[in-house]
Image (spheres, grey):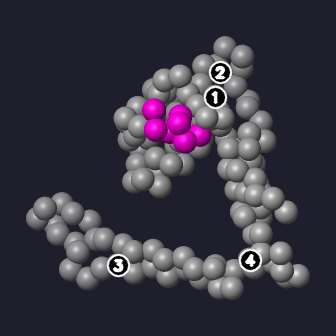
Amino acid sequence: MTTIDLASCLAAIPDRRGAEGKIYGQVGVILFSIIAMLSGARSYRQIHALIRARLCVLNAAFPDAALRRAPAYTSVRGILRQLDPNELEQAFRRHAESLDVSCAAAPSRFIAIDGKTLRQSFDAFADRKAAHVLSAFAVD
């Protein structure tokens, strides 16, 4: 079994926009939005800001999903809101299944996840939220 990249899995999600609404590629917006959220973006405006600031790096890393320019936050919102959550989940599942290249008779489908909140990392005076650490390990 070969590994399928996430952009290819996301390309299988149908684009429900009309022809006039396809200024930005759906795969690029979804993939770059995922990266922005993993980088800490929590709003459409923050997603837009991260894509705008790092567009050259993102386009170089993912040439198949490249965007000519950063979409406005309203465009990001429109594309993400029209997605079917079940289709997005299936795309993630296809990608995750392709990552298991252990060649074992029984595939390793278990990952141990452990999360901790660091003590005394919350500071209400400085408006700093508590720091969290998340660890994930393949059990095999």
Labels 3 and 2 touching (C-beta < 8 A): no
Three-letter residue code for mark 3: Thr
Find disc 4 in the rendering and name its residue.
Answer: 109
Question: Magenta segment range?
Answer: 56-62
Task: Find numbered disc 3 in the image and state the secondary structure of the residue it sits on.
Answer: strand
Position of residue 123 in the picture relative to residue 50 (left or right): left
Q: Residue at x 65, y 85 (%)?
A: 139
Task: Examine the residues drawn in magenta and state their main secondary structure.
Answer: helix
Which image quadrant is residue 20 in?
A: top right
Of residues 30 and 103, the one nearer the viewer is: 103
Mark 4 neighbour class, 10 Å CA radius: few under 14, some 14 to 19, many 20 or more: few
Does label 1 or label 3 sit earlier along the sequence?
A: 1
Residue at 54% of width from left, 76% of height from top? 136
Give me the disc on residue 68. none
Q: Which residue is located at x 53 percent, y 36 percent?
A: 60
- The answer for how far apart the CA atoms under marks 3 and 2 are is 42 Å
> What is the C-alpha distance between the residues marked 3 and 4?
26 Å
Relative horizontal placement of residue 61, taking residue 140 as reference (left or right) = left
- Residue beneath disc 1: 25
Q: Counting other residues with Cα less than 10 Å from the Cα at mark 1, is it few (<14), some (14-19), or many (20 or more)?
A: some
